[in-house]
Amino acid sequence: MHLRRATTAGVLAMATAAAGLIGISSAPMASADGIGKVWSWGSAASPAFTVPAEAQKDVQAIEVGGGHVLAMKDFGIIAWGANADGQATVPAEATSNVLSFSAGADFSLAIKKIDDFTGKVLAWGANGKGQTTVPEAALTRVSEVAAGGGHALAIRDIDDTNMGVVIGWGDNAAGQTTIPSAAQSGVTAIAAGGQHSLALKGDAVIAWGSNAANQTAVPAAAGSGVTAIAAGDTFSAALAGGQVIVWGGSAAVQAVPTEAQANIVAIAAGGGNIAAVTSGGSVIAWGDSANVAAVPDAAKTSISAVGVGSDVAFAISQAVPPETVRELKAKALKGGAQVSWLPPMAIQGAVLVGYQVKVNKGAWKSYGSEVNSVKLTGLGKKKTVTIRVRAVSYAGPGMPEMVKVTTK
Protein backbone atom coordinates (compact mmCIF):
# COMPACT_ATOMS: atom_id res chain seq x y z
CA MET A 1 0.00 0.00 0.00
CA HIS A 2 1.11 3.53 -0.61
CA LEU A 3 0.58 6.02 2.19
CA ARG A 4 -0.39 9.02 0.09
CA ARG A 5 -2.95 6.85 -1.64
CA ALA A 6 -3.78 4.90 1.54
CA THR A 7 -3.98 1.20 0.74
CA THR A 8 -3.83 -2.08 2.68
CA ALA A 9 -2.28 -1.11 6.00
CA GLY A 10 -1.30 1.88 7.99
CA VAL A 11 0.90 4.01 10.26
CA LEU A 12 1.40 5.71 13.82
CA ALA A 13 3.28 5.37 17.29
CA MET A 14 3.34 7.07 20.75
CA ALA A 15 5.89 8.58 23.11
CA THR A 16 5.93 6.61 26.34
CA ALA A 17 6.86 2.97 26.73
CA ALA A 18 4.08 0.91 28.28
CA ALA A 19 3.91 -2.47 29.93
CA GLY A 20 1.40 -5.11 28.98
CA LEU A 21 -0.23 -5.80 25.64
CA ILE A 22 -1.63 -2.32 25.05
CA GLY A 23 0.74 0.61 24.89
CA ILE A 24 2.49 3.47 23.18
CA SER A 25 6.06 3.40 22.00
CA SER A 26 8.96 5.15 20.39
CA ALA A 27 12.69 4.61 20.34
CA PRO A 28 15.01 6.88 22.39
CA MET A 29 15.11 10.41 21.01
CA ALA A 30 17.74 10.68 18.29
CA SER A 31 17.79 14.46 18.59
CA ALA A 32 15.73 17.30 19.98
CA ASP A 33 14.21 17.78 16.51
CA GLY A 34 10.90 15.91 16.21
CA ILE A 35 10.39 16.55 12.51
CA GLY A 36 9.70 13.25 10.76
CA LYS A 37 9.55 11.23 13.99
CA VAL A 38 7.53 7.99 13.93
CA TRP A 39 5.21 7.10 16.80
CA SER A 40 3.27 3.85 17.31
CA TRP A 41 0.38 2.64 19.45
CA GLY A 42 -1.89 -0.38 19.78
CA SER A 43 -0.89 -3.89 20.77
CA ALA A 44 2.60 -4.17 22.24
CA ALA A 45 2.51 -7.83 21.16
CA SER A 46 2.71 -6.79 17.50
CA PRO A 47 6.16 -7.48 16.00
CA ALA A 48 6.03 -4.01 14.46
CA PHE A 49 5.12 -2.15 17.66
CA THR A 50 8.61 -1.04 18.72
CA VAL A 51 9.86 1.82 16.57
CA PRO A 52 13.62 1.66 15.84
CA ALA A 53 15.94 4.58 16.58
CA GLU A 54 16.52 5.26 12.88
CA ALA A 55 12.82 6.12 12.49
CA GLN A 56 12.98 8.94 15.05
CA LYS A 57 13.88 11.70 12.60
CA ASP A 58 13.45 12.70 8.96
CA VAL A 59 10.95 9.99 8.00
CA GLN A 60 9.05 11.08 4.89
CA ALA A 61 6.37 8.40 4.52
CA ILE A 62 5.33 5.13 6.15
CA GLU A 63 3.44 1.93 5.28
CA VAL A 64 2.21 -0.93 7.48
CA GLY A 65 1.89 -4.52 6.25
CA GLY A 66 0.59 -7.63 7.93
CA GLY A 67 3.23 -7.52 10.66
CA HIS A 68 5.99 -5.32 9.25
CA VAL A 69 6.51 -1.63 8.57
CA LEU A 70 8.25 0.20 5.75
CA ALA A 71 9.31 3.84 6.02
CA MET A 72 11.00 6.22 3.62
CA LYS A 73 13.97 8.20 4.87
CA ASP A 74 16.21 10.21 2.56
CA PHE A 75 14.32 8.54 -0.31
CA GLY A 76 15.46 5.10 0.84
CA ILE A 77 13.48 2.38 2.61
CA ILE A 78 13.98 1.24 6.20
CA ALA A 79 11.93 -1.62 7.70
CA TRP A 80 11.13 -3.40 10.95
CA GLY A 81 8.76 -5.98 12.36
CA ALA A 82 7.88 -9.49 11.17
CA ASN A 83 10.50 -10.90 8.83
CA ALA A 84 9.79 -14.63 8.47
CA ASP A 85 9.60 -14.27 4.69
CA GLY A 86 12.25 -11.56 4.36
CA GLN A 87 9.60 -8.84 3.99
CA ALA A 88 11.56 -6.51 6.31
CA THR A 89 14.97 -7.30 4.77
CA VAL A 90 15.32 -4.32 2.46
CA PRO A 91 17.41 -5.02 -0.65
CA ALA A 92 20.31 -2.65 -1.30
CA GLU A 93 18.64 -1.31 -4.42
CA ALA A 94 15.72 -0.02 -2.33
CA THR A 95 17.87 2.01 0.07
CA SER A 96 18.17 5.00 -2.27
CA ASN A 97 16.30 6.81 -5.05
CA VAL A 98 12.89 5.35 -4.19
CA LEU A 99 9.82 7.10 -5.60
CA SER A 100 7.06 5.11 -3.92
CA PHE A 101 6.58 1.97 -1.82
CA SER A 102 3.97 -0.33 -0.29
CA ALA A 103 3.72 -3.00 2.41
CA GLY A 104 1.53 -6.07 1.85
CA ALA A 105 0.54 -8.92 4.15
CA ASP A 106 3.98 -10.57 4.02
CA PHE A 107 5.79 -8.86 1.16
CA SER A 108 7.01 -5.41 0.13
CA LEU A 109 7.15 -3.28 -3.00
CA ALA A 110 9.09 -0.18 -3.99
CA ILE A 111 9.65 1.85 -7.13
CA LYS A 112 13.31 2.47 -7.98
CA LYS A 113 13.68 5.80 -9.75
CA ILE A 114 14.65 5.70 -13.43
CA ASP A 115 13.53 9.18 -14.46
CA ASP A 116 11.97 12.11 -12.60
CA PHE A 117 8.50 10.59 -12.17
CA THR A 118 8.67 6.86 -12.90
CA GLY A 119 10.82 3.82 -12.32
CA LYS A 120 10.89 0.05 -11.97
CA VAL A 121 9.22 -2.14 -9.34
CA LEU A 122 11.34 -3.91 -6.73
CA ALA A 123 9.74 -6.69 -4.68
CA TRP A 124 10.85 -8.80 -1.72
CA GLY A 125 9.33 -11.13 0.87
CA ALA A 126 6.88 -14.01 0.42
CA ASN A 127 6.27 -15.28 -3.11
CA GLY A 128 3.85 -18.16 -2.57
CA LYS A 129 1.33 -16.54 -4.91
CA GLY A 130 3.79 -14.90 -7.28
CA GLN A 131 3.40 -11.52 -5.60
CA THR A 132 7.13 -10.76 -5.69
CA THR A 133 7.71 -12.13 -9.19
CA VAL A 134 7.68 -8.76 -10.94
CA PRO A 135 6.38 -8.93 -14.52
CA GLU A 136 8.35 -7.32 -17.33
CA ALA A 137 5.68 -4.65 -17.75
CA ALA A 138 6.45 -3.37 -14.23
CA LEU A 139 10.15 -2.83 -14.90
CA THR A 140 9.71 0.53 -16.67
CA ARG A 141 7.56 3.68 -16.44
CA VAL A 142 5.81 2.76 -13.16
CA SER A 143 4.59 5.62 -10.94
CA GLU A 144 2.63 3.92 -8.12
CA VAL A 145 2.47 0.51 -6.39
CA ALA A 146 0.04 -1.13 -3.97
CA ALA A 147 0.58 -4.39 -2.07
CA GLY A 148 -2.39 -6.41 -0.81
CA GLY A 149 -2.98 -9.75 0.88
CA GLY A 150 -1.20 -11.76 -1.82
CA HIS A 151 -1.42 -9.57 -4.91
CA ALA A 152 0.30 -6.48 -6.25
CA LEU A 153 -0.84 -3.56 -8.37
CA ALA A 154 1.07 -0.86 -10.22
CA ILE A 155 0.27 2.19 -12.32
CA ARG A 156 2.24 2.35 -15.56
CA ASP A 157 2.53 4.86 -18.36
CA ILE A 158 2.89 2.82 -21.53
CA ASP A 159 3.71 5.91 -23.59
CA ASP A 160 2.92 9.61 -23.60
CA THR A 161 -0.58 9.00 -24.96
CA ASN A 162 -1.47 5.87 -22.95
CA MET A 163 -0.96 6.78 -19.30
CA GLY A 164 -2.34 5.65 -15.96
CA VAL A 165 -2.63 1.95 -16.87
CA VAL A 166 -3.14 -0.47 -13.95
CA ILE A 167 -1.31 -3.80 -14.07
CA GLY A 168 -1.50 -6.59 -11.50
CA TRP A 169 0.17 -9.84 -10.52
CA GLY A 170 0.13 -12.44 -7.77
CA ASP A 171 -2.99 -13.98 -6.23
CA ASN A 172 -6.01 -13.79 -8.54
CA ALA A 173 -8.37 -16.21 -6.76
CA ALA A 174 -11.08 -13.54 -6.58
CA GLY A 175 -10.20 -11.73 -9.79
CA GLN A 176 -8.27 -9.02 -7.95
CA THR A 177 -5.54 -8.86 -10.63
CA THR A 178 -7.92 -9.15 -13.57
CA ILE A 179 -7.90 -5.45 -14.42
CA PRO A 180 -11.22 -4.09 -15.72
CA SER A 181 -11.16 -2.03 -18.90
CA ALA A 182 -12.09 1.12 -16.98
CA ALA A 183 -8.80 0.89 -15.04
CA GLN A 184 -6.62 0.49 -18.13
CA SER A 185 -6.16 4.21 -18.66
CA GLY A 186 -6.28 7.47 -16.74
CA VAL A 187 -5.83 6.01 -13.24
CA THR A 188 -4.04 8.23 -10.71
CA ALA A 189 -4.19 6.15 -7.48
CA ILE A 190 -4.52 2.49 -6.49
CA ALA A 191 -5.17 0.47 -3.33
CA ALA A 192 -4.96 -3.25 -2.64
CA GLY A 193 -7.00 -5.04 0.01
CA GLY A 194 -7.03 -8.65 1.15
CA GLN A 195 -8.54 -9.95 -2.10
CA HIS A 196 -9.86 -6.84 -3.79
CA SER A 197 -8.50 -3.84 -5.64
CA LEU A 198 -9.37 -0.16 -5.99
CA ALA A 199 -8.41 2.55 -8.48
CA LEU A 200 -9.09 6.26 -8.64
CA LYS A 201 -9.89 7.53 -12.12
CA GLY A 202 -10.68 11.20 -12.36
CA ASP A 203 -12.60 11.66 -9.12
CA ALA A 204 -14.43 8.31 -9.13
CA VAL A 205 -13.60 4.94 -7.54
CA ILE A 206 -13.35 1.72 -9.56
CA ALA A 207 -13.37 -1.59 -7.63
CA TRP A 208 -12.90 -5.25 -8.54
CA GLY A 209 -12.07 -8.60 -6.95
CA SER A 210 -13.80 -10.19 -3.98
CA ASN A 211 -17.17 -8.75 -3.00
CA ALA A 212 -17.86 -11.18 -0.14
CA ALA A 213 -18.32 -8.26 2.27
CA ASN A 214 -19.59 -5.76 -0.34
CA GLN A 215 -16.13 -4.20 -0.51
CA THR A 216 -16.32 -3.73 -4.30
CA ALA A 217 -19.91 -2.45 -4.37
CA VAL A 218 -18.92 1.20 -4.79
CA PRO A 219 -21.57 3.53 -3.32
CA ALA A 220 -22.84 6.58 -5.19
CA ALA A 221 -21.02 8.85 -2.75
CA ALA A 222 -17.68 7.48 -4.03
CA GLY A 223 -18.64 8.05 -7.65
CA SER A 224 -17.44 11.66 -7.75
CA GLY A 225 -15.38 14.16 -5.79
CA VAL A 226 -12.97 11.52 -4.45
CA THR A 227 -9.38 12.58 -3.72
CA ALA A 228 -7.93 9.51 -1.95
CA ILE A 229 -8.69 5.80 -1.55
CA ALA A 230 -7.80 3.07 0.94
CA ALA A 231 -8.39 -0.68 1.21
CA GLY A 232 -8.54 -2.85 4.32
CA ASP A 233 -8.80 -6.62 4.37
CA THR A 234 -12.51 -6.76 3.48
CA PHE A 235 -13.57 -3.13 3.18
CA SER A 236 -12.89 -0.02 1.12
CA ALA A 237 -12.71 3.67 1.93
CA ALA A 238 -12.58 6.94 0.06
CA LEU A 239 -12.06 10.59 0.93
CA ALA A 240 -14.44 13.05 -0.73
CA GLY A 241 -14.97 16.66 0.24
CA GLY A 242 -13.08 16.12 3.49
CA GLN A 243 -15.42 13.27 4.49
CA VAL A 244 -14.52 9.58 4.89
CA ILE A 245 -16.79 7.13 3.05
CA VAL A 246 -16.63 3.40 3.95
CA TRP A 247 -18.21 0.33 2.39
CA GLY A 248 -17.79 -3.38 3.11
CA GLY A 249 -16.22 -4.85 6.23
CA SER A 250 -17.68 -4.81 9.72
CA ALA A 251 -20.26 -2.54 11.29
CA ALA A 252 -17.49 -1.06 13.46
CA VAL A 253 -15.40 0.14 10.52
CA GLN A 254 -18.49 1.41 8.66
CA ALA A 255 -19.46 3.55 11.66
CA VAL A 256 -17.59 6.69 10.58
CA PRO A 257 -17.31 8.99 13.61
CA THR A 258 -18.65 12.52 13.41
CA GLU A 259 -15.12 13.92 13.56
CA ALA A 260 -14.24 12.10 10.32
CA GLN A 261 -17.16 13.48 8.36
CA ALA A 262 -15.48 16.82 7.61
CA ASN A 263 -12.02 18.41 7.42
CA ILE A 264 -10.14 15.15 6.78
CA VAL A 265 -7.03 15.43 4.60
CA ALA A 266 -5.62 11.87 4.57
CA ILE A 267 -6.79 8.31 5.23
CA ALA A 268 -5.21 4.89 5.65
CA ALA A 269 -6.69 1.43 6.14
CA GLY A 270 -5.39 -1.89 7.39
CA GLY A 271 -6.89 -5.08 8.76
CA GLY A 272 -10.34 -3.98 9.93
CA ASN A 273 -9.35 -0.42 10.89
CA ILE A 274 -9.15 3.09 9.49
CA ALA A 275 -7.04 6.04 10.56
CA ALA A 276 -7.57 9.59 9.31
CA VAL A 277 -5.74 12.90 9.67
CA THR A 278 -7.68 16.12 10.19
CA SER A 279 -6.74 19.46 8.66
CA GLY A 280 -5.49 20.40 12.13
CA GLY A 281 -3.00 17.52 12.21
CA SER A 282 -4.92 15.27 14.61
CA VAL A 283 -5.51 11.54 14.16
CA ILE A 284 -8.90 9.82 14.37
CA ALA A 285 -9.06 6.01 14.27
CA TRP A 286 -11.87 3.46 14.39
CA GLY A 287 -12.77 -0.09 13.41
CA ASP A 288 -12.36 -3.59 14.80
CA SER A 289 -9.49 -2.89 17.22
CA ALA A 290 -10.17 -0.91 20.38
CA ASN A 291 -6.39 -0.65 20.85
CA VAL A 292 -5.96 1.15 17.56
CA ALA A 293 -9.00 3.37 18.16
CA ALA A 294 -7.52 4.60 21.45
CA VAL A 295 -5.47 7.37 19.83
CA PRO A 296 -2.95 8.81 22.31
CA ASP A 297 -2.44 12.53 22.87
CA ALA A 298 0.85 12.62 20.96
CA ALA A 299 -1.04 11.68 17.78
CA LYS A 300 -3.50 14.50 18.20
CA THR A 301 -1.23 17.30 17.08
CA SER A 302 1.26 18.07 14.30
CA ILE A 303 0.74 14.77 12.44
CA SER A 304 1.51 14.76 8.72
CA ALA A 305 0.85 11.12 7.82
CA VAL A 306 -1.09 8.24 9.32
CA GLY A 307 -1.79 4.59 8.73
CA VAL A 308 -2.91 1.47 10.50
CA GLY A 309 -2.66 -2.31 10.64
CA SER A 310 -4.85 -4.91 12.28
CA ASP A 311 -3.55 -4.27 15.82
CA VAL A 312 -1.06 -1.41 15.68
CA ALA A 313 -0.93 2.09 14.18
CA PHE A 314 1.80 4.56 13.24
CA ALA A 315 2.14 8.26 12.46
CA ILE A 316 4.73 10.74 11.33
CA SER A 317 4.97 13.77 13.56
CA GLN A 318 6.02 17.25 12.55
CA ALA A 319 6.23 18.31 16.21
CA VAL A 320 9.06 20.66 17.20
CA PRO A 321 10.79 21.31 20.54
CA PRO A 322 9.38 24.17 22.64
CA GLU A 323 10.89 27.60 23.16
CA THR A 324 12.72 28.34 26.43
CA VAL A 325 10.79 29.01 29.64
CA ARG A 326 10.34 32.69 30.51
CA GLU A 327 11.21 34.74 33.60
CA LEU A 328 13.05 31.96 35.44
CA LYS A 329 13.61 32.97 39.08
CA ALA A 330 15.05 31.33 42.18
CA LYS A 331 14.40 32.38 45.79
CA ALA A 332 16.83 31.22 48.47
CA LEU A 333 15.43 29.03 51.24
CA LYS A 334 17.06 27.36 54.22
CA GLY A 335 18.97 24.46 52.62
CA GLY A 336 17.04 24.85 49.37
CA ALA A 337 15.38 27.12 46.84
CA GLN A 338 11.99 27.97 45.39
CA VAL A 339 12.17 28.04 41.58
CA SER A 340 9.48 29.58 39.39
CA TRP A 341 8.98 30.33 35.69
CA LEU A 342 6.45 31.22 33.04
CA PRO A 343 5.55 28.94 30.12
CA PRO A 344 7.44 29.36 26.85
CA MET A 345 6.01 31.38 23.98
CA ALA A 346 3.63 29.20 21.97
CA ILE A 347 4.83 28.09 18.54
CA GLN A 348 3.12 25.85 16.00
CA GLY A 349 3.99 22.17 16.45
CA ALA A 350 5.31 22.60 20.00
CA VAL A 351 2.55 21.25 22.24
CA LEU A 352 3.69 21.58 25.85
CA VAL A 353 3.63 18.29 27.79
CA GLY A 354 5.75 19.18 30.83
CA TYR A 355 8.93 20.61 32.32
CA GLN A 356 12.26 19.27 33.56
CA VAL A 357 14.40 20.70 36.35
CA LYS A 358 18.06 19.97 37.05
CA VAL A 359 20.33 21.06 39.91
CA ASN A 360 24.07 21.34 39.16
CA LYS A 361 25.13 18.12 37.40
CA GLY A 362 22.31 16.02 38.76
CA ALA A 363 19.62 14.20 36.78
CA TRP A 364 16.71 15.95 35.14
CA LYS A 365 13.48 15.63 37.14
CA SER A 366 10.17 15.78 35.28
CA TYR A 367 7.01 17.73 36.17
CA GLY A 368 3.60 18.14 34.53
CA SER A 369 2.68 20.96 32.19
CA GLU A 370 0.52 22.57 34.91
CA VAL A 371 3.57 23.11 37.19
CA ASN A 372 5.36 26.48 37.14
CA SER A 373 6.99 26.49 40.58
CA VAL A 374 9.07 23.85 42.36
CA LYS A 375 10.47 23.76 45.90
CA LEU A 376 13.94 22.21 45.94
CA THR A 377 15.22 20.85 49.25
CA GLY A 378 18.31 19.10 50.53
CA LEU A 379 20.73 21.43 48.72
CA GLY A 380 22.79 22.23 51.83
CA LYS A 381 23.21 25.49 53.73
CA LYS A 382 24.89 28.50 52.15
CA LYS A 383 25.59 26.60 48.95
CA THR A 384 25.63 28.23 45.52
CA VAL A 385 23.80 26.00 43.07
CA THR A 386 23.00 26.19 39.37
CA ILE A 387 19.39 25.36 38.47
CA ARG A 388 18.27 24.64 34.92
CA VAL A 389 14.69 24.44 33.71
CA ARG A 390 13.48 23.38 30.27
CA ALA A 391 10.09 22.85 28.66
CA VAL A 392 9.20 19.56 26.95
CA SER A 393 6.97 18.93 23.91
CA TYR A 394 6.14 15.72 22.04
CA ALA A 395 9.34 16.33 20.05
CA GLY A 396 11.42 16.32 23.24
CA PRO A 397 12.98 18.97 25.48
CA GLY A 398 13.79 22.51 24.44
CA MET A 399 16.88 24.47 25.41
CA PRO A 400 17.26 25.05 29.18
CA GLU A 401 17.28 28.38 30.99
CA MET A 402 19.68 28.73 33.93
CA VAL A 403 19.66 30.60 37.23
CA LYS A 404 22.09 30.56 40.19
CA VAL A 405 21.14 30.96 43.83
CA THR A 406 22.91 30.72 47.20
CA THR A 407 20.89 28.85 49.79
CA LYS A 408 20.40 30.17 53.35
Image: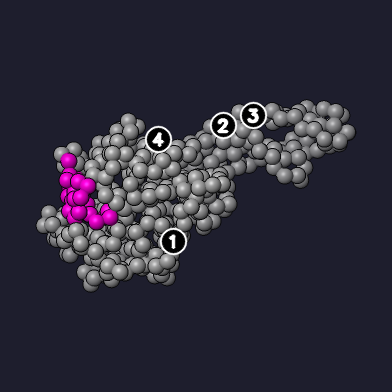
Q: Which residue is mark 4?
A: 280
Q: Residue at x 39, y 67 (%)?
A: 85
Q: Residue at x 26, y 62 (%)?
A: 151
Q: Secondary structure at mark 3?
A: loop
Residue 1 in view? yes
Q: Residue at x 83, y 36 (%)?
A: 379
Q: Is residue 209 magenta?
A: yes
Q: Residues within 10 Å of mark 2 (few under 14, many from 20)?
A: few
Give the residue type at disc 1.
Ala
First in sequence: mark 3 vs mark 4: 4
Residue 240's disc is none
Mark-to-mark CA distance, 1 and 4 = 33 Å
Give how far across and how far down residue 102 sits, in percent: 34, 58
Boundaries of the magenta span? 192-219
Mark-to-mark CA distance, 2 and 1 = 43 Å
Front-most of residues 76 and 22: 22
Residue 345's disc is 2
